[in-house]
Amino acid sequence: MSKMTLGSYTFAVNPSNMPLIHKVLSIAYLNTYSSVVTFSWGADYAGLIIPLKWDYMNDAQWNSIDAIYAVDQDVVFDPQDGTSKTYNVHIINPFDGEHFVDSNFHKNVVMTLLLKSEVT
């Protein structure tokens, strides 16, 4: 698998775990006296939450991605998942994980992306 990109940064190490990216239904419902009414606006990528997980990550990659988070803007994410699709995303949570003391590695790292749209 090729290396994923986030904005202009190419991951040194891809995540060890990432969910499938697929369209989700935007749907609401309301119970009535004897039935249920549904409202559906169809399937879309908007609003899909994508947690990226690494078993281990070095400081250089951590710092590069953390700098993208600090800018607080949408960026393009290319998951290199074989679909040739790219997505506009926003990092919505700072990294979570553990830091090895006296080392330049982090473990059990999680970063969460909010998928906003497919790049067309």
Image (spheres, helix red, strand yellow):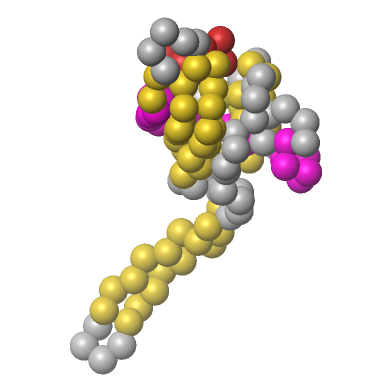
Q: Position of residue 22 (x, y in %)?
A: 60, 53
Residue 13 in view: yes
Q: Position of residue 7 (x, y in %)?
A: 61, 20
- In percent of the image, x 56 and y 48: which residue is there? 19
What residue is at 38 percent from the left and 25 percent from the top?
A: 98
The quadrant in which the C terminus is found is top right
Residue 5 found in image quarter:
top right
Q: Residue 26 in the image: x percent, y percent?
A: 46, 59
View extreme (front): residue: 102
Which residue appears farthest toward the bottom when viewing the image? 34
Nearer-the-camera pick, 21 or 51: 51
**Residue 62 visible in the current orientation:** no
Q: Magenta: predominant secondary structure element?
A: strand
- Report the span colored magenta: 80-97
On whether residue 64 falls in the magenta region, the answer is no
Give left or right: position of 20 versus 73.
right
Q: Is residue 71 above or below residue 57?
A: above
Q: How many labels were placed on the picture?
A: 0
* Residue 51 in picture, x, y percent from top left: 48, 40
Please say whether residue 81 is one of the residues in the magenta stretch: yes
Residue 53 sits above or below residue 37 on the image: above
Residue that appears at 50% across and 42% down: 50
